[in-house]
Each structure stands twice: as structure tokens, then as C-alpha cells.
Image (cartoon, rainbow, N blue to C red):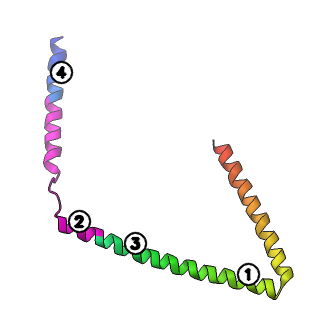
Amino acid sequence: MNTHQEHDKDMKKLLDEGFRSIDGDIDDSTPSLQWFNQFVQDQQEQLKERFKRDFILFLMAACGILAVFSLTLFQMPILFLLLQVAIFVGATVYTVFIHTKKVKGI
């Protein structure tokens, strides 16, 4: 029983020394309010730039899709119908594939 208590004391002493060395390595200073404000401002600027880039890409893709849509609808109606059938079949196959993959995964 006595050796068990001594072992507990030794273990506690080792843990205290280890935690003290870890605590000494950690810098507990808090950055200034100005730093946080600058960080938030930088993040907001990055988000605005990313939004602009994504929005421009979206508009370009939408214009391209509408151009192809109108071209095939008015110039080549048969191609338009074939494209619609192909898209429907592709979406159905993709949906079934994803659904079966999820069911098998569960």
C-alpha cells in the first residue's frame, strides 16, 4: 500500500514537472485589438475577391450555357432534343449511381 502511494506521488511529481515545462513553452499573450481588426478586414477583403471571381465565372458559364441553348433551340432543334434526352439520361444514371453508392455505404 505504501509503495502504491509513493508511486502516485512520483507520478504526480513527474506530471507536474511535465505540465510546468509545457506551460512555460506556451505564449499566453493576447494579440492587440488592432491586430484582430486588421485580420478581420483582410479576411473580408479575401472573401469579397473570391465572391467576385466566383460570380464572374458563374456569369460566364451561364452566358455560355444560354448561348448553346438558344443556338441549338433555334438553329438545330433536333440537336436540342437529343441534348435534352442525353442530359436527362445522364442525370438519371448519375442519381441512381450516387443513391446506390450511399445505400451500399450505410
The answer to whether the residues at label 4 and label 3 have Cβ atoms under 8 Å apart is no
Q: Secondary structure at mark 3?
A: helix
- Where does label 4 land, which residue? 7
Residue 9 in which image quadrant: top left
Q: Mark 2 vs mark 4: which is more N-terminal?
A: 4
Q: Mark 3 vs mark 2: which is more N-terminal?
A: 2
- How many numbered marks, from 0 up? 4
Q: Mark 1 vs mark 3: which is more N-terminal?
A: 3
Q: Mark 4 vs mark 3: which is more N-terminal?
A: 4
Residue in the picture at 69% in, 85% down: 67
- 71 vs 9, left or right, is right
- 26 vs 95, left or right, is left
- Which residue occupies the foreground of this view, 19 or 51? 51
- Image coordinates of residue 42 in percent, x first then y, are 30, 73
Q: Mark 4 vs mark 1: which is more N-terminal?
A: 4
- Please identify the quadrant where the C terminus is shown: top right
Question: How far apart, in angstroms, are the residues tagged by discs 2 and 4?
Answer: 47 Å
Question: How far apart, in angstroms, are the residues tagged by discs 4 and 1?
Answer: 79 Å
Q: Is residue 23 magenta?
A: yes
Question: How far apart, in angstroms, are the residues tagged by discs 2 and 1?
Answer: 48 Å
Is residue 42 depicted above or below 23 in this figure? below
- Where does label 3 land, which residue? 47
- Where does label 1 land, which residue? 69
